[in-house]
Image: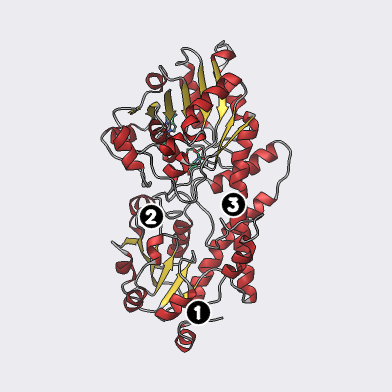
Amino acid sequence: MQISVIGSGYVGLVAATCLAELGHDVVCVDSDSAKIAALNAGQTLIHEDCLQELLSRHRGTRLSFSTSIQEATRDAVVIFIAVGTPSADDGSVDLSCVESVAQSLNGSMNGYKVIVEKSTVPVYTSEWIQNALAPEGRAHNEFDVVSNPEFLREGTAVTDFLYPDRIVVGASTERAANIMREIYAPLIDGSYGQLPSAVPKPEKARLLPMYIETSPRSAELIKHASNAFLALKISFINAVASFCEAVGANIEEVCKGIGSDSRIGPEFLRAGIGYGGSCFPKDVAAFRAVTREFGFEFPLLDEIKRINEEQRIRFIRKVRGALRTIKGKRLAVLGLAFKDGTDDVRESPAIKVIEQLLQEKCQIIAFDPAAMDRARQMLGNRIRYAPDAYSAADGADALLILTEWKEFASLDLARIKRLLRSPIVLDGRNVFSQTEMAEAGLNYHSIGRPTLEVSQSLLKKGHIVR
Ligand SMILES: NC(=O)c1ccc[n+]([C@@H]2O[C@H](COP(=O)([O-])OP(=O)(O)OC[C@H]3O[C@@H](n4cnc5c(N)ncnc54)[C@H](O)[C@@H]3O)[C@@H](O)[C@H]2O)c1
C-alpha cells in the first residue's frame, strides 16, 4: 500500500517506520525541514527502543522523507495525519496544524484517498476535516476520513505499534474500512510476528490485537476517554498514597491489595509525583473542553488535574521538610524525562519540580540517561548537568529521583551514600525498596510510604521501618 504519514514526531516517525516494517511503501512528511534533513541524513531524532534498527532497515527503500505534502501524497492511497494537537490557552485543542494539513491536501487530491486521523483530536474532527476538504466542490466519494487513534507509549512505542492491545478504526464507509483492514492485516492475523525478521514480541503483549471497528465519533472519543481514564488511575492512586502518609499505611501494600482484583488490575497503580508528557495533561484538558462545548459538565476531569498538580507541591514540601531549609542547597536530580525510556521532557513533572526548586534558590545538578539535550533546551544553564548519577550525587545535600528509569534502581547505594554530603534520598517515583535503603543507611523519603530515618534503619537493619 502506498501511504504517506504527515508529521515526523514521536507518533508520525514511529508509525511511518512501523508501516514500512509491515511491508507498505511510506513517505513521511514534516514541515520542519531541519528534521527531514536529519532523517534523510540517517539520524533517528528521538530516543525510542528498536527505532534506529527499523529506520536503518527501511530508509531509502520502503521509507523516505519529504517536506512536500503535495509530492508525498500524489501516489498515496492512505494519508495518516500525525501532526501535533497542542492545548490552546483555554484547554481546548489547537487544531491549526491539522487544518494546515487539510488545506495542503486540498491541492493534492487526485483520486480516492483515505485520510486517517492519527493525531489525538476531539470528537467531530473527522466531520470538520471532511468539510475542510469538501468546499472546493470535491465530491465526497473521492475521499473518506477515518479516525484511527494511536495508543503507543513513548519508551515502548515501536513494540506498542507492532504488538498493540487493540487497533481502533472509526470509518464511515466500507471502502475505507476495507483499506484500513488491509493496512493492519499482518498485525490482525499475527503474521507479522511470525516473520524471522520481526521485532520480538514483548512477553506481556497480546498474541493478537482486538480489532475494533466503530463510527469515527466513537473512535475519537475512545482516545480521549482512554487517556482521561489512565490519568484518573494515576491521580486516584496518588490521592490514596497521600492518605497512606497521613495514617502510616504503605501504598505498595495497598496497591498490591487493590491491583489483585481482576476488575481493577495492577497496571498504572504506581504512586509518584504525577503524570506529565505531551498527552495526558493536554488530553484531560481537551476532553474537559469538548464535553463543556457540548453542554456536558464533567468536573471529575478537573479533579484529576488538581490532584496531579498537588502531587508536585506535596513533593516540594517533602524536600523542604527533609532539609529543613532549601535555599542555597545543592540538590542532585536523577531523571528529567517525563517517564523512563524516552528523551521527551514535554510537561515533565521532573522539569516542573526543578523549576519550583530554582525559584526557591536551590542549586540543581541533574542527570538523565536520555533527556539531557532536550532538558538543556528548556532549562539552559540555570542548572548543571552531570555525566552520570554518581557525579550528580557528589557533594549534594540530597538526592532526588524524579523519573522512574530502571537503571536508577541498580545504583550502588553505598557509593551514593559516601558521595552525598547528607544521606538524604527523596524518591518521587518509589524506585527503591525501603529494605535496600535501610541497608544502605540512607534517610529515605518516598511517596505513600513511611519515611525511613538513618538512626531507625541502623537499629533495625534489614527491616522495613514503620
Ligand atoms: N507522543 C505520544 O506518546 C502520543 C501517543 C498517542 C497519540 N499522540 C498524538 O499524536 C499527535 C502527534 O504527537 P507527537 O508526540 O508525535 O507530536 P510531535 O510534536 O512530536 O510531532 C508533530 C510533528 O508534526 C509536524 N508538523 C506540524 N504541522 C505540520 C504540517 N502542517 N505539515 C507537516 N508536518 C507538520 C511537526 O513539525 C512535528 O515534527 C498528537 O495529536 C498527540 O496527541 C501522541
Q: Which mark is residue 139?
A: none
Let me know if residue 131 appears in the view.
Answer: no
Mark 1 or mark 3: whose residue is earlier in sequence: 3
Residue for badge 1: 452
Residue 172 appears at what percent x and percent y? 62, 23
Crowd rating for badge 2 (residues with CA inside 10 Å; few <14, some 14–19, many 20+): some
Mark 3 to mark 2 CA distance (whole Å): 26 Å
Give the position of the C terminus as an image quadrant. bottom right
Q: Is mark 3 within 8 Å of ligand 1?
A: no
Mark 1 to mark 2 CA distance (whole Å): 32 Å
Name the quadrant containing residue 358.
bottom left
Task: Reply above or below: 137 against 51.
Answer: above
Q: Residue at x 32, y 32 (%)?
A: 58
Tell which of 7 and 347 is nearer to you: 7
Residue for badge 2: 379
Mark 1 to mark 3 CA distance (whole Å): 29 Å
CB-based contact (under 8 Å), mark 1 and mark 3: no
Q: Residue at x 54, y 39 (%)?
A: 209
Q: Residue at x 53, y 70 (%)?
A: 317
Residue for badge 3: 231
How is the rendered protein coloured? secondary structure
- Regarding mark 3 in the picture, which secondary structure is present there? helix
Let me know if residue 409 appears in the view.
Answer: yes
